[in-house]
Amino acid sequence: MTALDHPPLKHRLGLVSATRHCLTLAGRNLRHLKANPGEIIGFAVVQPLMVIALLVYVFGGAIAGDTATYLQYALPGLIVQSSVTSVLATGTGLHQDISVGLFDRLRSLPIARIAPLMGHLIGTLVRVWAGLLMLLAVGAAQGFEVRTGVWAALAGLLLVALFSAGLAWLSMMIGLAAKSVTTVHLFTGMLSIPLTFCSNVFVKTDTMPGWLQFWADINPISQEATALRALLTGGPVGDSVWWTLGWTVVMTAVFAPLAIQAYRRRV
């Protein structure tokens, strides 16, 4: 007899209990990383070093004239690009949990029904913060300078976390709606390329063709990178912060209900 043979348990849980369940499942997701130290070292240490070395020391002189100038421009963009990559992987983890029957098992337990989703969301945000702090540390070792105050820098990192939370709902919706892990990889890859490469993450948009420049300028990743760049290195913030917050609200308002609806259908 399996958990599927039992009807879902009906119970009422308080906010404290529900929060504890969410944090418990977030801890479970993070412990998976602890069980795979190679994955941690690869994504958190080796990948940032390789990306910075490739972009800054190979292309930096040609793009900006010297590597130090390009590092100041590129590192905030690399933080944004890294956070997008981490967030889009959320859907894959969610789909794998469903495929192995973990959610069916959780459904038979007296836990908050939203806890599995929130556990993935919280775990993703912790990974995003760990990744961006690692990139900042590696960048500082290479000469990157935070030229604004502590509060402005913290505001920039908080903005990245908020945007990541909004984008995570899109990734989770894909993970819940897709029929296979291959489909999840396909859709998240199709999203990642136009979002990160057709933006101002790596280069300014001035020399792009008109049609591509139009998209790059309204691209939410460009707005996020512009806001973080200004909050870390100075310069005009403009309305990029408000655009980033607006995109965050829109993504959450649209994709959170769709993800929860898909989640209810799957469990």
Image (cartoon, rainbow, N blue to C red):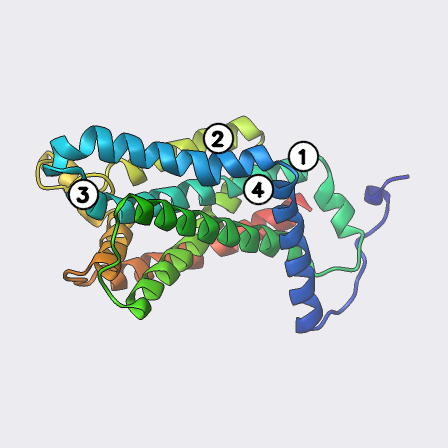
Q: Where is 135 relative to 10, above or below?
A: above
Q: Earlier in the sequence, mark 4 or mark 3?
A: 3
Could you tell me the amino acid type at mark 1?
Answer: Ser
Residue 197 figure quarter = top left
Residue occupying image coordinates x 70% and y 73%:
14
Evaluate if marks 4 and 1 touch, with contact meaning CB atoms under 8 Å apart.
no
The disc at residue 160 is none
Could you tell me the amino acid type at mark 3?
Answer: Ala
User: Is residue 135 in sight in this rendering?
Assistant: yes
Could you tell me the amino acid type at mark 4?
Answer: Leu
The disc at residue 99 is 1
Q: Residue 152 location in percent, x, y? A: 29, 67
- Report the mark closest to the observer, 2 or 4: 2
Q: CA distance from mark 2 to mark 1?
A: 15 Å
Q: CA distance from mark 1 to mark 3?
A: 47 Å
Locate residue 91 relative to residue 192 in the image: left or right. right
Q: Residues within 10 Å of mark 3 (few under 14, many from 20)?
A: some
Q: Secondary structure at mark 3?
A: helix
Name the residue tied to disc 3: 68
Name the residue tied to disc 4: 176
Residue occupying image coordinates x 40% and y 50%:
132
Q: CA distance from mark 2 to mark 4?
A: 13 Å
- Report the mark closest to the observer, 2 or 3: 3
User: Is residue 254 in sight in this rendering?
Assistant: no
Q: CA distance from mark 2 to mark 3?
A: 35 Å
Name the residue tied to disc 2: 185
